[in-house]
Image: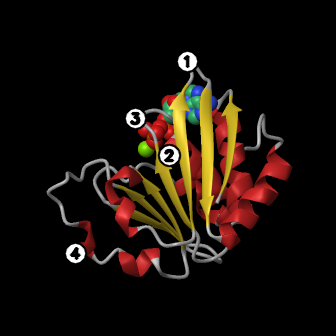
Amino acid sequence: MSRLALFSRSPRETEGLGRLLGSLLGGGAFVALRGELGSGKTCFTRGIVAGAAPTSAHLVASPTFAIMNEYPGAVPVYHFDFYRLTGAFDIAELGFEEYFQGDGICIVEWSERLDELFPEEHLIVTLEHGGEDLRSLTFEAAGPEMDGVLARFAELAKPEKFL
Ligand SMILES: Nc1ncnc2c1ncn2[C@@H]1O[C@H](COP(=O)(O)OP(=O)(O)O)[C@@H](O)[C@H]1O
Ligand SMILES: [Mg+2]
């Protein structure tokens, strides 16, 4: 497992970091986003889709009324948002494991709500407010493949620190 922490100073920078990450992700990748409302999860997701499925990037919006949005591309991207789900909701019964274990790229907002269902290979990205337009992004990769992705991302993203 490897970690990386860096800062973003604008929505554009957050989207750019997402785009870089998206360009490095392969089919089957699972990205779990954490962070409060307005921390930039959807902004970062728009970037990931721009990197992984460029023709669909303009479609990215919070799936407020749906639980999942699908963005077509060479590798399809499945964008989940569990904001509206409560603890009483049995996520396992919805059959999302098929997506999580499948060949598309999965991005999950409010992933705090399904820790126990993460595939072995995954990336957790925690976004935090740093005031005004400043956000911190912390990346934690699990599994050899995602470790490799994060290492390449770290080289290209010029991080503040690589732990
Ligand atoms: N550095 C930054 N990165 C991402 N969003 C930022 C940043 N600075 C300001 N913002 C603003 O914060 C909000 C983030 O919204 P959004 O991506 O929908 O958050 P979330 O999905 O986490 O609720 C947007 O209004 C965006 O313009
Ligand atoms: Mg959102």
Q: Which residue type carries mark 2?
A: Thr
Q: Which residue is disc 3 drawn over?
A: 37
Q: x, y (%) of residue 37?
A: 40, 35
How far apart are the two marked residues, 3 and 1, measured between alpha carbons? 14 Å
For image coordinates 45% across by 58% down, the residue present is 108
Mark 4 secondary-structure assignment: helix
Instruction: Indicate which disc residue 11 carries.
Output: none
Residue sitting at the far top: 132
How far apart are the two marked residues, 1 and 4, measured between alpha carbons? 39 Å
Q: Which residue type carries mark 3?
A: Leu
Q: Which residue type carries mark 4?
A: Glu
State the image quarter where residue 123 is shown. Answer: bottom right
Q: Badge 2 local density, few (<14 within 10 Å), some, or many (20+)? A: many
Q: x, y (%) of residue 30?
A: 54, 66
Q: Which residue is disc 1 drawn over?
A: 131
From the Cβ of disc 3, is ligand 1 less than 8 Å away?
A: yes
Q: Which residue is disc 4 drawn over?
A: 93
For image coordinates 68% across by 32% down, the residue present is 7
Q: Earlier in the sequence, mark 2 or mark 4?
A: 2
Q: Earlier in the sequence, mark 1 or mark 4?
A: 4
Mark 3 secondary-structure assignment: loop
Q: How is the image coloured?
A: secondary structure
Of circles 1 and 2, the one toward us is 1
Mark 2 secondary-structure assignment: helix
Mark 1 secondary-structure assignment: loop
Q: Which residue type carries mark 1?
A: Gly
Q: Which residue is disc 2 drawn over?
A: 42
For the N terminus, the quadrant is bottom right
Q: Earlier in the sequence, mark 3 or mark 1?
A: 3
